Amino acid sequence: LASASAAKAVDFDPQAISKTAWAFAKAGHSSPALFDAISRASAAKVSHFNPQDLSNLAWAFAKAGHASPALFDALANASAIRIDEFKPQGISNTAWAFAKAGHCSPALFDAFERASEAKIEQFDPQELADTAWAFAKA
């Protein structure tokens, strides 16, 4: 499944890209070839990802421990542009992913700060804790 997905990743739409990465990371199957293919496939499409796809993809790469600085740069730019569309869970998961991956993005964390302040009453306790952890670690 991983090798078939890697071979066809370039044909995946943004949702299929993020769901595939999420599923393999969640299952603990960190196939380097698959994550490399997903990283390459995402590069040209990241501006078409919705906030959940951006968040899920960042989370998957961080969870899998698969370094991809160019992808994280693209995710940071796309996420900062669409930050007002993120739900609290997306903010906290994406912030967690960037902190966990050790990928520094001050502009994105500035956007997280603004978005978190605007939506703070909507955050549940876990989202608050994860966001706080991400800011402390970043």
Image (tube, rainbow, N blue to C red):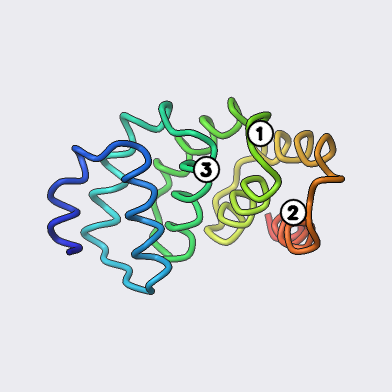
What residue is pinned by disc 2? 135
**Front tag of 3 and 1:** 3
Residue positioned 43% across, 65% down in the render: 65
Residue positioned 54% across, 37% down in the render: 51
Where disc 3 sits, the SS reads: helix
What residue is pinned by disc 1? 107
Distance in Å between CA atoms under marks 3 and 1? 19 Å
**In this picture, is 29 found above or below 78?**
below
| Location of residue 49 (image quadrant) | top left
Specify whether 46 is left or right of 35: right
Where disc 1 sits, the SS reads: helix
**Front tag of 3 and 2:** 3
Distance in Å between CA atoms under marks 3 and 2? 20 Å
Specify whether 90 is left or right of 6: right
Amino acid at the residue labelled 3:
Gln
Residue 1 screen position, x and y as percent: 17, 64
What residue is pinned by disc 3? 52
Residue positioned 61% across, 31% down in the render: 80
The crowd level at tag 2 (other Cα within 10 Å; few <14, some 14-19, many 20+) is some
Where disc 2 sits, the SS reads: helix
Give 28 or 125, whichever is nearer the viewer: 125
Specify whether 20 is left or right of 77: left
* Mark 1 vs 2, N-terminal side: 1
Amino acid at the residue labelled 2:
Phe
Q: State yes or no: discs 3 and 1 in contact (Cβ < 8 Å).
A: no
